[in-house]
Image (cartoon, grey):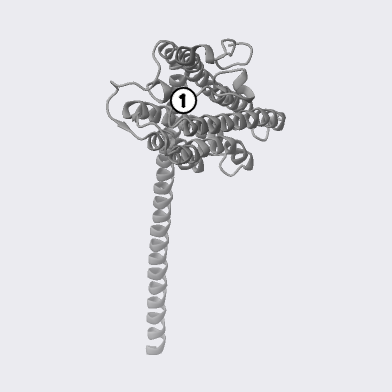
């Protein structure tokens, strides 16, 4: 009896142990499930908040881009009108009254520099960053501004007969501000907002036609700059009437070349961004070319050919 009684006691204890073990096991399992559920809900909430944050950032950037593009178009007409009556005081149009000055090579490097560092800073954050076509498209833009930011100031600095008149800091700051705006627009469009690289069946046609125009314009622009810098060296830092090549047809073939470049860029990008930059280039350079022609006529009188146009061969 004692043996049976002990057996039943042990069995009862065993069942209680099993019940307790199962109960605690269920409790632990229930707690783990609740913890997992809690973690899942927290994770979903975190992803939801993160998604909202990213969406807000995208909307903010899109708004900034649209207002920047609108700003580019809004300054075109005022730029044209103001430069028609008042030329920026640098180069042959230099005059006192515009505040402190710096050396022209330093000014050119400073005011053109955003086109390089800001473009390279923004570009990797675009959705099209990994698309080889976006790299191909931005390359002519960077090539032009590598010449304008680095090589052109170096050519100026090597001219020991360069005039002593400095470049107004106020003009350099205004140009720096425009280049911040324009570099943001061009880089952001090519690397992010241009989303039809693979769908655009005419991409290569537009790119190659625009690139041909761009290369012709850049070659003309660089050649004319070299001629003008060379004439300053020959003239002991002064000015001479340039002759030869397209200088026989227009006063400022360097400006005509740059206008061609950005017309080619507008064709390559086929965008409101590229076209806006082309319009602004015309608004900036065409009135200055007209003023340069008047300056040559006044300074050199009969020595300057009266039938030479300002910037566009045979037209203007």
Could you say where residue 93 lies in the image, as x and y percent from the top left? 40, 20
The image shows a total of numbered marks equal to: 1
Could you say where residue 264 lies in the image, as x and y percent from the top left? 62, 26
- Residue 228 visible in the current orientation: yes
- Residue 60 visible in the current orientation: no
Q: Determine the residue positioned at 52% across, 38% down.
A: 147
In front here: 40 or 66?
A: 66
Q: Determine the residue positioned at 38% across, 61% down.
A: 27
Residue 75 lies, with reference to residue 202, above or below; the image says above
Write down the quadrant of residue 167 in the picture.
Answer: top left
Write down the quadrant of residue 238 in the picture.
Answer: top left
In front here: 24 or 237?
A: 237
The quarter of the picture where the C terminus appears is top right
Q: Secondary structure at mark 1?
A: loop
Mark 1 packing: few (<14 Cα in 10 Å), some, or many (20+)? Answer: some
Q: Determine the residue positioned at 42% across, 22% down.
A: 92
Residue 309 lies, with reference to residue 60, above or below; the image says above
The quarter of the picture where the N terminus appears is bottom left
Name the residue carrying label 1: 239
């Amino acid at each position: 009896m004692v043996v049976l009684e002990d057996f039943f006691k042990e069995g009862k204890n065993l069942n209680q142990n099993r019940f307790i073990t199962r109960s605690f096991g269920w409790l632990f399992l229930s707690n783990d499930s609740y913890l997992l559920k809690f973690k899942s809900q927290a994770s979903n909430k975190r992803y939801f908040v993160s998604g909202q944050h990213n969406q807000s950032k995208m909307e903010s950037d899109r708004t900034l881009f649209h207002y920047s593009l609108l700003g580019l178009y809004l300054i075109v007409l005022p730029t044209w009108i103001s430069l028609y009556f008042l030329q920026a005081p640098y180069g042959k149009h230099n005059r006192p009254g515009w505040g402190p000055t710096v050396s022209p090579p330093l000014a050119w490097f400073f005011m053109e520099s955003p086109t390089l560092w800001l473009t390279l800073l923004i570009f990797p954050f675009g959705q099209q960053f990994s698309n080889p076509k976006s790299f191909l498209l931005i390359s002519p833009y960077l090539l032009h501004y590598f010449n304008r930011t680095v090589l052109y100031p170096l050519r100026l600095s090597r001219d020991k007969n360069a005039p002593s008149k400095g470049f107004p800091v106020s003009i350099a700051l205004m140009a720096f501000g425009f280049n911040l705006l324009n570099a943001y627009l061009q880089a952001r469009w090519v690397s992010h907002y241009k989303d039809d690289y693979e769908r655009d069946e005419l991409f290569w046609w537009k790119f190659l036609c625009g690139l041909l125009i761009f290369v012709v314009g850049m070659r003309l622009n660089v050649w004319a700059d070299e001629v003008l810098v060379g004439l300053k060296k020959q003239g002991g830092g002064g000015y001479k009437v340039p002759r030869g090549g397209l200088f026989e047809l227009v006063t400022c073939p360097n400006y005509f070349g740059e206008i061609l470049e950005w017309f080619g860029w507008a064709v390559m990008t086929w965008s409101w961004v590229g076209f806006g930059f082309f319009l602004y280039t015309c608004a900036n350079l065409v009135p200055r070319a007209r003023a340069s022609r008047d300056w040559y006529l006044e300074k050199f009188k009969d020595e300057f050919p009266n039938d030479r146009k300002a910037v566009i061969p045979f037209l203007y």
